[in-house]
Each structure stands twice: as structure tokens, then as C-alpha cells.
Image: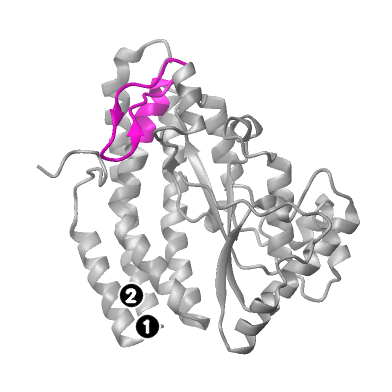
Amino acid sequence: MPQPPRVARRAGRPRSGLRPGRRTLHEAGFAWESSCRIDQTVRTDRDEAWHVERARMWRTLVALGLRRMLFGVESGVDSILSRFNKETTAEQNALAIRTLSALRVPTRYTYITFDPLMTLDELKATHAFQGRTDLLLRPQPELDARDIVRGVRDEDWVAEHTTGRPLHTGISYMLVSMECLIGAAYTRQATAAGLTGQPEPLVGRVACPYRDWRIGVAGSWAQRWVDRHFALDYTLKSLEKVLDGAARHAVRQARVVLKDAAHQVLGDMIAAIEAYDLERPGQKEALSAWIEAALAERAGMLRGQMATTVTEVGRHLPGDHAATLAREHGRWASARGRELINAGESCA
């Protein structure tokens, strides 16, 4: 999965983002989006003064028209972050997410749920981190930046100001899997573990089974879940980008319905995996059937939820946007297959 571009680490220039161009765009009435590393908010090797200055920088960027900032969190598990060579920690990610939400910075987070080298304990820790309700905090516009920097490190303060929403509601796409892309550093790790197979040049990747066959089965079904709901989710995301106010909020809540369902699906998969022995790969078909049935049940519940949700969202949308959503929802509701979109077959 491609990572957001790295931002230059120039500690001596904490206001490097506040260039005249941003102010000019703001004065012309433009809003803007961008991407950034999480360590531009929290660094383990910097003092309080650095963090306060960064907090003030983020507030200034919001004031200058920042509409959304993408952060590649990718995991909340230290061993996985090390494997991904992210140069961040789970605690660092947690503090940054708290800080950005308390500062009212509009964010999107990317998160890789599955990777071929992961263990069951790592998958369970991933599910737990995505479900944490102590990370997304209520905006605190009246507080000084210094108070926020200190507050996010105080668990009592966090408990007082949490929204109660789980982190997965802020993740762009749930149940994403790491692919072994041709030439990537992660692929070299998988090769060293003896996992990689033949290259698949049509999609730029290398075939790679999972070290834990049970997680491999779950990851395969997770990708089918993602592909089954992608068109509807992407339609909602596209509408969210061009709307404001109540309409944008309504669309965002519709996406949360999909995210909630995906997190529940991940919990279902973990429960299924735990019923099977890692040392008995001959049970693969039985596990696959269990997960398929669990996903079918979740999909049935989701179909009813989305019907109600889309009707409600449509009341907030202009006519053309409402028609677009209704059309895509109709296609989504009538589909029954769970085939992979990008399976790598040739056009022939």
C-alpha cells in the first residue's frame, strides 16, 4: 500500500508549512487537502516546546483553509510498525490522534489490517487498537495549545474529553491488506521468510501466502468484503469531498455505518480463527466456510441499515447528488456476489 510522502524533518523550522501560498489560497476562498507523517505532530525525541509549536501550527493551517489531512498511521501495534519500517510507535500514534482531534484538525487515517507476516496476537491487538475509544477527542478551541499538549498525556483529562467514538470511524478504508509489491522492502522480508512465490506483473505484486494460514483465509475474505462495498463507499467519499455543513456530516455518518460493520466483521473473523489449530492447515475449507457464513450474516444486517441510512442522507443532499447516491445504493443492494475486483487475471 503506498505511503503518504514524507515531510522533511526540519526541527528548526516548525512553521515550514505556513508559506505565503497557503495564505494566498485562503484569501482567495480556497480550501485544500494534503498528507503528512504522524511524526509532524508527535515526536518522542522532542520536548514540550516543540509539541506546543506544532499544535499552534496545526491550528493555523486549519484557519488557513485546511479541509482534510491524511496521515498514514498504518498500525497501532509496535511489532507491525517496526516491520513496516514506519519509524513510529503505537503510543506516538495514539498521542498524535488525540492531539489532532482536540485541535479540531480534520483528518483521515490509513491503516493496514492484514499482512502476510503477522501473528494472531498482532491481529487481535490490531482489532483492539481500531476499537479504542480514548483516541478521538472533542475539539477544545478554547484551550491554549500547551494545555492540549499536556492534556492528551493525562488519562483523566482524556477520559473527560473523549467523544466515545472508536478509532475505526476515522480510518479511511477498513480491512486493508498489505500487498507484496514487486521490489518493495516488505516483499524482501516476506521473501526472507520463505513466503513469496511467482510475480504477478499485471498488478505489480508478488504472490505471497500468509505465514498463519488462518489469517490468510480471513484476509482473503476481508478483501472480498472490501471489494463488495467499495463502489458505495467510494461514492459516499466522493460526495463528502464536495459537500459542506449538514449534508457533508450526513454522508460522513453513512460511511461510519460501513466502518462499524467492517470492524464487527474483523471481530467475527478473529473468533473463527481461534476455533482452528494453526498446526492443522487441512481445515482451511472449514474455516473459509465459517467466515463466509459470518460475512453473509453481517451483510444481511448491513443491507437493512444502509437502506435506512441512505434514505436519511438523501434528505440532506441536492437533487443531483441524491440521485447519484440512490443509483449506486440500488446497485449495491441488488448485488449478491463477493468476487475480487483486482484478482490479477488478464483481460482475455
CA neighbours of label 1 inside 10 A, class few (<14), some (14 to 19), many (20+): few
Q: Mark 2–mark 1 contact, CB under 8 Å?
A: yes
Nearest to the observer: residue 289 or residue 65? 65
- Is residue 213 rendered magenta in the image? yes
Badge 2 amino acid: Thr
Residue that carries the numbered disc 1 in the rendered image: 315
Q: Quadrant of the C terminus?
A: top left
In the image, residue 265 lies in the stretch drawn in magenta: no
- Taking the image as shown, residue 290 lies to the left or right of residue 316, namely left
- Disc 1 element: loop
The residue pinned by badge 2 equals 311
Looking at the rendered structure, the kind of residue marked 1 is: Arg
Report the magenta residues as a range: 193-219
In the visual, does 103 lie left or right of 186? Answer: right
Can see residue 287?
Answer: yes
Real-space Cα separation, disc 2 to disc 1, in angstroms: 7 Å
